[in-house]
Image (tube, rainbow, N blue to C red):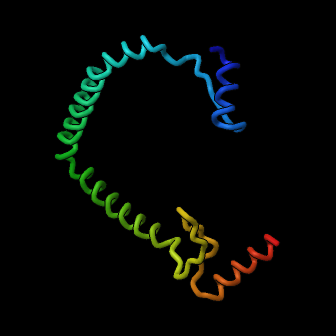
């Protein structure tokens, strides 16, 4: 079956919005099988060298007092920023539409007047 025939059949099966892509640089089935055989050894070598590197880094930095101070300060700053980031976009009232799978947010605000005004403006713009 050539490409034209395959696309015609796929269009019948999937409809007119069918799409496809071709990767000319992808390996053949035989090349993939060969790669699959050697992959576990490469994966083990990667894991072992990363573990050795990490162990050496921990060993070197454990005795460095300045690094330990900076690490503790960075952890505290990161925690504070993450907490603030989480609170930054919270609103007291959220209004939206429940669909079969998702809740679509239409407006957020600190009081009902704000929320109603936003929804009314959106309805007015949509009309």
Question: Measuring 65% from the left and 88% from the top, which residue is drawn there?
Answer: 113
Residue at horizontal 80%, vertical 76%? 124
Quadrant assignment, res 14: top right
Q: Nearer the viewer, residue 7 or 13?
A: 13
Q: Position of residue 8 (x, y in %)?
A: 70, 25
Report the side of 4 relative to 42 (left or right).
right
Q: Residue furthest right?
A: 127
- Residue 102 location (% of width, % of height): 54, 63
Question: In the image, is residue 7 above or below residue 96?
Answer: above
Place residue 34 in its image quadrant.
top left
What residue is drawn where x is 62% and y is 27%? 21
Q: In front: 24, or 4?
A: 4
Q: Residue 44 appears at what percent x and percent y? A: 24, 26
50 in relation to 61, above or below: above
Quarter of the picture containing the C terminus is bottom right
Compared with 57, 87 (above or below) is below
**Residue 30 found in image quarter:** top left
Whether residue 105 sits left or right of residue 11 in the image: it is left
Is residue 45 placed above or below 105 in the rendered structure? Answer: above
Quadrant for the N terminus in the image = top right
> Residue drawn at (27%, 32%), measured in percent from left and top?
50
Tell me if 11 is positioned left or right of 76 in this view: right
> What is the x, y in percent for residue 33?
38, 15
Numbered-mark total: 0
Q: Nearer the viewer, residue 92 or 67?
A: 92
Q: Is 18 on the left-hand or right-hand side of 83?
A: right
């Amino acid at each position: 079956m050539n490409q034209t025939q395959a696309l015609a059949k796929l269009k019948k099966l999937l409809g007119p919005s069918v799409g496809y892509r071709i990767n000319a640089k992808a390996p053949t089935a035989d090349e993939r099988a060969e790669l699959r055989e050697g992959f576990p050894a490469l994966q083990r070598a990667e894991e072992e060298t990363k573990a050795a590197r990490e162990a050496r880094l921990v060993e070197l930095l454990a005795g460095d007092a300045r690094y330990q101070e900076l690490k503790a300060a960075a952890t505290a700053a990161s925690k504070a920023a993450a907490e603030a980031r989480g609170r930054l976009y919270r609103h007291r009232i959220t209004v939206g539409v429940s669909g079969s799978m998702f809740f679509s947010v239409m407006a957020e605000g600190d009081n009902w007047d704000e929320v109603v005004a936003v929804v009314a403006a959106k309805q007015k713009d949509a009309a």
